[in-house]
């Protein structure tokens, strides 16, 4: 059992939970994740460890409500518990002093990007953070990123905050600078990571992406997180989640991510019906 110590709503769809997990807080390194199972009947979902305090014994999870499991998780309040938290899982990010590192985050991808940008900063790199969202109300962790980035570039699709552009636009400008960035780290929707990798490819800039495939066990046993990287089969949970963006077969990954969409949709609908029934019952009581 892992007690929830704090809960905050960061945007209409994004929540931050501070969860008691002393062992994980002690061992975790940037780039790693946990598998969360709210109770024994819930789906197991991977969430990045967005922050941690080893002394106080807690970790931070930042998640977007996209389907049944994440909606149910958002219903938990401080004082309640998550039944099962497994981790830290995955290989930690390789952090080196490289010079100028550009960290690109799209949507909820800003949450997993934060500990990496922070570690890049602590390692003595000059860190430019480009963060993007559909609109201003969906931007998350802007003050936190501002505190650790040497330069922060905010983009929105509709121009309601920062620059009206896709994240690839300022990224392309930075790539054309002399000298170009030493490394780019991009985390967000697969399509965003694909186009970030295409932007850096002509410049030969090493580009790290963190893949968000479907996962079940998180330990290399089920094959659910299979991806093709450089023509070879790799498992995101044990070989990743970070890979060389220039070698990832994003089209195949996107195809596999959509494979369960009808089932996910049905579960999401059922979850809304449950919610409505509970609301009605509360009203009647
Ligand atoms: P579902 O009904 O299962 O899915 C709803 C829709 O969301 C799907 O149709 C699909 O479009 C999309 N989706 C489903 N699974 C994933 C997935 N694994 N990645 C991306 N999109 C997905 N999410 C966060 O909000 N915060 C995080 O820090 C975070 N870290 C992750 C780290 C790793 C290593 C991985 C693999 C994924 C991470 N994710 C994170 C994604 C998260 O696991 C999914 O959003 C979650 O499993 C959705 O569960 P659900 O039942 O609510 O939605
Ligand atoms: Fe099962 Fe990776 S989640 S093999
Ligand atoms: Mg799912």
Image: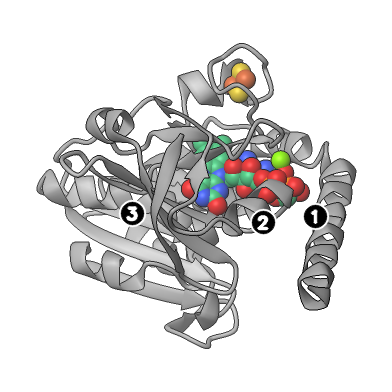
Please tell me how crowded label 1 is: few (under 14), some (14-19), or many (20+) other residues with Cα within 10 Å: some
Q: What's the residue at 52%, 73% (across, down)?
A: 11
Task: Tell me, for residue 71, which label it has, or none.
Answer: 2
Side of 10 where 24 appears, left or right: left
Q: Are marks 1 and 2 in contact (CB under 8 Å)?
A: yes
User: Residue at (38%, 34%) from the top-left corner?
Assistant: 32
Q: Is mark 2 within 8 Å of ligand 1?
A: yes
Q: Residues within 10 Å of mark 2 (few under 14, many from 20)?
A: some
Is residue 188 in view from this perspective? Answer: yes
Label whose residue precedes the other's in the sequence (2 or 3): 2
Residue 275 position (above or below residue 223): below
- Name the secondary structure under disc 3: helix
Discs 1/3, front? 1
Residue found farthest to the left: 124
Q: Quadrant of residue 244?
A: top left
Residue at x-position 61% and y-position 59%:
75
Q: Which residue is more in the foreground, 203 or 261?
A: 261
User: What residue does disc 3 label?
Assistant: 114
Q: Residue furthest bottom?
A: 160
Q: Secondary structure at mark 2?
A: helix
Q: Earlier in the sequence, mark 1 or mark 2?
A: 2
Quadrant (top left, top right, bottom left, bottom right) of the C terminus: bottom right
- In this figure, what is the number of numbered marks? 3
Quick check: which quadrant has ligand 3?
A: top right
Q: Are marks 2 and 3 in contact (CB under 8 Å)?
A: no
The residue that label 1 is drawn on is: 271
In-front residue for pair 152/63:
63
- Foreground of the two, 254 or 46: 46
* Cα distance between the residues tagged 1 and 2: 8 Å
Q: Nearer the viewer, residue 151 or 65?
A: 65
Location of residue 281 in the rendering, given as x and y in whole percent from the top left corner: 82, 68
Residue at horizontal 25 percent and vertical 40 percent from the top: 57
């Amino acid at each position: 059992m892992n007690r929830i110590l704090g809960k905050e709503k960061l945007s209409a769809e994004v929540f931050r939970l501070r969860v008691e997990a002393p062992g994980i807080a002690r061992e975790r390194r940037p780039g790693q994740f946990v598998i969360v199972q709210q109770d024994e009947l819930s789906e197991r979902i991977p969430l990045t460890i967005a922050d941690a305090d080893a002394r106080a014994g807690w970790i931070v999870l930042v998640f977007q409500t996209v389907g049944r499991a994440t909606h149910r998780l958002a219903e938990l309040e401080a004082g309640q518990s998550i039944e099962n938290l497994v981790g830290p899982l995955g290989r930690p990010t390789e952090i080196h002093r490289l010079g100028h590192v550009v960290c690109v985050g799209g949507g909820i991808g800003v949450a997993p990007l934060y500990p990496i940008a922070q570690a890049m900063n602590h390692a003595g790199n000059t860190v430019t953070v480009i963060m993007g969202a559909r609109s201003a109300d969906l931007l998350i962790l802007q003050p936190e990123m501002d505190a650790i980035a040497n330069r922060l570039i905010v983009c929105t699709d509709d121009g309601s905050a920062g620059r009206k552009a896709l994240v690839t636009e300022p990224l392309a400008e930075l790539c054309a600078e002399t000298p170009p960035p030493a490394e780019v780290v991009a985390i967000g929707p697969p399509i965003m990571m694909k186009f970030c990798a295409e932007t850096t490819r002509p410049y030969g800039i090493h580009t790290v992406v963190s893949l968000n495939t479907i996962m079940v066990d998180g330990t290399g046993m089920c094959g659910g997180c299979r991806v093709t990287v450089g023509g070879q089969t790799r498992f995101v949970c044990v070989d990743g989640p970070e890979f060389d963006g220039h070698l990832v077969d994003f089209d195949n990954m996107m195809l596999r991510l959509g494979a369960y969409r009808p089932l996910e949709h049905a579960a999401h609908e059922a979850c809304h019906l449950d919610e409505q029934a509970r609301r009605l019952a509360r009203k009647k009581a």
